[in-house]
Amino acid sequence: EILRGEMSRVGAMQHGSIADTLFSLDNPQLDFVSIAQGLGVEGSRATTAEAFNDQFAAALAKRGPHLIEVLV
């Protein structure tokens, strides 16, 4: 929605369906854990609150950054 607002600010009110796909973060589907690992950062994915709590505690116990992707 932010990108749509910025486009209208610069006068780009009309855009086609192909340009419309550029405003989506789910096409292509992004794997943030793999992206983090590719950049040398540990990463994990949590699908439940319990999994997040466990991963967060483990991340705090280690040195360095750790990305936790939370699926809601």
Image: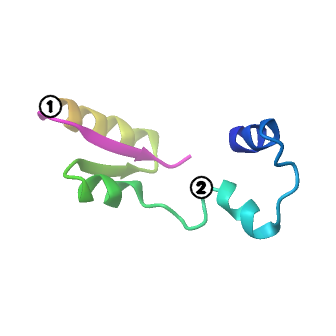
From this view, report whether residue 45 is shown above or below residue 49.
below
Instruction: Return the x and y of residue 3 as percentages of the image width and height.
Output: 69, 43
> Label for residue 47?
none
For residue 14, which quarter of the picture? bottom right
Q: Secondary structure at mark 2?
A: loop
Q: Which mark is residue 25?
A: 2
Q: Position of residue 70 (x, y in %)?
A: 46, 45
Question: To which quarter of the image does residue 22 belong?
Answer: bottom right
What amino acid is found at the position of numbered circle 1 in the picture? Ala
- Magenta span of residues: 62-72
Question: Is residue 25 shown left or right of residue 35?
Answer: right
Q: Residue at x 15, y 35 (%)?
A: 64
**For the residues marked 1 and 2, what is the alpha-carbon distance in whole angstroms?**
31 Å
- The image quadrant where one finds the N terminus is top right
Foreground residue among 40 and 20: 20
Q: Position of residue 36 (x, y in %)?
A: 30, 52
Q: Secondary structure at mark 1?
A: helix
Nearer to the camera, 65 or 39: 39
Residue bearing mark 1: 61
